Image (tube, rainbow, N blue to C red):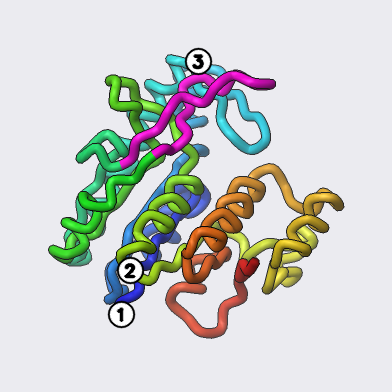
Amino acid sequence: METLKVIKIGGNIIDDEQALQLFLKQFADLQSPKVLVHGGGKLASRFAKKLGVEVKMMNGRRITNAETLEVITMVYAGKINKSIVSRLQAHQCNSVGFTGADGNSIVSVRRPVEDIDFGYVGDITRVNTDVLAILLNNAITPVLCAITHDEQGQLLNTNADTIAAEIAIAMSSHLKTELYYCFEKSGVLSDVNDENSVIEHIDSATYKSLLESKVISDGMLPKLTNSFHAVSNKVANVYLGTPEMLFTNNSKFTTIQL
């Protein structure tokens, strides 16, 4: 059975021209079926500041008002997504870039207001695996940005880590699926200032201990929350680390287990 790799890349890779070029070349060479999910929050924040739009974050997640939604739509679905797709085409990796609205691929509901009003932020309710399967069965790589929709004409900012996890979960009913969170660190670090302090295996008990000791930073929380959600829902394996973990046998990374 083929293994589908759902791979999410973060803003630090997108921001580093050399790192992005290398990643996309190596990604294009992967022979297994694959889906790429990208964020781009740092670039969106820079554009927002240039336009005088205030950037607000809470627990590692962006608060999205109407102005912010306009900015991230332009940056995620436009500049970043199409740039990635064009570069993959240059490496002979046929790909299609889209939001969750395209092909009705990812449906969300606007997050209800509880303690915090996150604004136009979506919580995923459905992944249309038929659309993804059509592309994958025709050797076309889906490239999704961090925007979904509510089927009522409203786009919604949606955490890219969550999108990757939900795609992996949904596709696991069709294929053996692995989820990779690729970012600038070698994995989850016990000491954020020490690249060699990678925690190579995290299970539920370790995760609870890390949370209680506040070792995990805000930006890592969504990744770990989604990692455990994925492995609890039939995703075969979840890995966190630099892109090298995909392409070399000697890189360090973190593996998530129940």
Q: In this view of the protein, can residue 137 be seen by the observer?
A: yes
Assign a secondary structure to mark 2: loop
Disc 1 residue type? Met
How far apart are the alpha carbons under marks 1 and 2? 7 Å
Disc 3 residue type? Gly
How far apart are the alpha carbons under marks 2 and 3? 45 Å
Within the magenta stretch, is there residue 111? yes
How far apart are the alpha carbons under marks 1 and 3? 51 Å
Between circles 2 and 3, the one closer to the viewer is 2
Name the residue: 34% across, 42% down.
80
Residue assigned mark 1: 1
Residue assigned mark 2: 175
Residue 4, relative to residue 39: is it above or below?
below
Front position in the image: 146 or 111 = 111
> In the image as oriented, which residue stretches furthest toward the bottom?
249
Name the residue: 75% across, 69% down.
197
Assign a secondary structure to mark 3: loop
Between circles 1 and 3, the one closer to the viewer is 1
> In the image as oriented, which residue stretches furthest toward the left?
138
Q: Residues within 10 Å of mark 3 (few under 14, many from 20)?
A: few
Q: Residues within 10 Å of mark 1 (few under 14, many from 20)?
A: few
Q: Specify the segment rendered in magenta.
A: 106-125
Which image quarter is the C terminus in? bottom right
In-image side of 195 versus 145 (left or right): right
Residue 171 location in percent, x, y?
35, 59
Residue 174, relative to residue 144: is it above or below?
below
